[in-house]
Image (cartoon, helix red, strand yellow):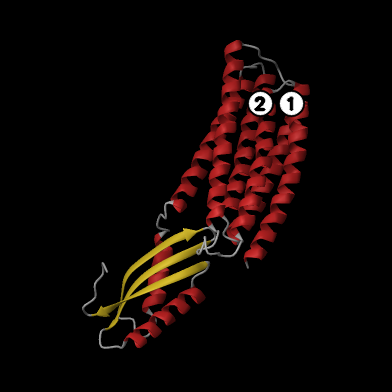
């Protein structure tokens, strides 16, 4: 299964990487020819997409490795680390682009881009939005944080192209200051996206609880197992593409240890069958009615 996830992600990443290489060359070349700082900034954003896709490929390659003595829970967190590296790249690129735009605004070296820049930007918007939809669909399907983060990078590139479009159109209508101003807006988009990706990956690394809906589903499936008198506590954390479930349940205190163990095993099997993307389930058994919720 892990090998299959990696091969799917690898195919998606290579497809988008080739597209980004072509877009970078086209936008950078036309940006310099048409004298559009917004388009050049947009080209830099596409170039950063190439670097982040490499990060995604490497992190997913590590994440699909099996558990070993030093990593008994596997290597799934590599995808979260990859998403964090990606977010840092986004923030650095955004700050660099923003400072360059501000320097241009302060110096007053403004120019009016040619109409060729408009065609390049519209092409970028269409292609990058297509990349976003393609990548996020696959990322959600295989539950890959790194691939979803890369998809958000494509979406931020599409947004930045929209901002660049407004800048070039404004400059051609007689307001040349809008071109570098649009580049600054592009930079803000990129930094904002980087911060959002960073916060999301940080939650996973800090073992933040997943959404309530999933915990409610786990509670419902666990209480349905014969022999379970009460579900005392449900804890769920994400570990790469998988969920790790820690469950406390209560059974009749008159049962033997072996019987309690069998019920716990049935709970574990039920959750593995009914809850998607379960990596591991730990079931702690308490006596009922004298359960100890905090044990």
Labels in figure, total: 2
Q: Is residue 258 above or below residue 98?
A: below
Q: Is residue 206 above or below residue 95?
A: below
* Quarter of the view holding residue 162: top right
Estimate the x, y position of residue 106 in percent, counting from the top left.
57, 13
Asked if marks 2 and 1 touch (Cβ < 8 Å), the reply is: yes
Name the residue nearer the viewer: 115 or 220.
220
Which quadrant: the N terminus? bottom right
Dot 2 or dot 1: first in sequence order is 1
Q: Name, please, the residue furthest toward the left.
A: 290
Q: Residue, x 61% and y 26% (percent of image)? A: 183
Q: Is residue 202 above or below residue 182?
A: below
Tell me the element at label 1: helix
Name the residue nearer the viewer: 181 or 154.
154
Q: Is residue 90 above or below residue 293?
A: above
**Spatial distance from mark 2 to mark 1, Cα to Cα?**
8 Å
Residue 182 appears in view: yes
Give the residue number, with chain letter if any, for mark 2: 38
Q: Residues within 10 Å of mark 1 (few under 14, many from 20)?
A: many
Name the residue nearer the viewer: 95 or 259.
259
Give the residue number, with chain letter if any, for mark 1: 31
Estimate the x, y position of residue 156 in percent, counting from the top left.
60, 39
Q: Residue, x 48% and y 69% (percent of image)? A: 280
Estimate the x, y position of residue 199 in percent, counting from the top left.
46, 44
* Quarter of the view holding residue 260: bottom left
Q: Residues within 10 Å of mark 2 (few under 14, many from 20)?
A: many
Q: Residue, x 59% and y 65% (percent of image)? A: 66
* Quarter of the view holding residue 89: top right
Tell whether 226 sits left or right of 254: right
Estimate the x, y position of residue 172 in percent, counting from the top left.
70, 20
């Amino acid at each position: 299964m892990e090998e299959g996830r990696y091969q799917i992600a690898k195919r998606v990443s290579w497809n988008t990487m080739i597209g980004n290489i072509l877009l970078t060359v086209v936008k950078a070349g036309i940006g310099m020819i048409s004298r559009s700082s917004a388009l050049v900034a947009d080209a830099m954003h596409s170039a950063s997409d190439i670097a982040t896709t490499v990060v995604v490929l490497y992190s997913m390659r590590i994440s699909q490795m099996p558990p070993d003595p030093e990593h008994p829970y596997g290597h799934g967190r590599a995808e979260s680390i990859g998403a964090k590296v990606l977010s840092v790249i986004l923030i650095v690129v955004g700050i660099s682009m923003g400072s360059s735009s501000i320097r241009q605004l302060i110096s007053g070296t403004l120019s009016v881009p040619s109409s060729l820049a408009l065609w390049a930007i519209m092409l970028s918007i269409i292609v990058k939005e297509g990349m976003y939809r393609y990548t996020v669909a696959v990322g959600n399907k295989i539950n890959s944080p790194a691939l979803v983060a890369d998809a958000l990078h494509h979406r931020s590139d599409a947004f930045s192209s929209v901002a660049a479009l407004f800048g070039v159109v404004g400059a051609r209508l007689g307001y040349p200051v809008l071109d570098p101003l649009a580049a600054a807006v592009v930079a803000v988009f990129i930094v904002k996206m980087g911060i959002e990706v960073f916060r999301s990956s940080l939650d996973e690394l800090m073992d933040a609880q997943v959404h309530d809906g999933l915990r409610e589903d786990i509670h419902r499936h666990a209480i349905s197992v014969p022999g379970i008198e009460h579900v005392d506590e449900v804890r769920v954390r994400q570990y790469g593409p998988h969920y790790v479930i820690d469950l406390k349940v209560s059974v009749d205190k008159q049962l033997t240890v072996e019987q309690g163990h069998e019920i716990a095993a049935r709970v574990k099997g039920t959750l593995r069958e009914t809850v998607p993307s379960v990596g591991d389930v730990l079931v702690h058994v308490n006596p009922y009615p004298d359960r100890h919720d905090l044990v």
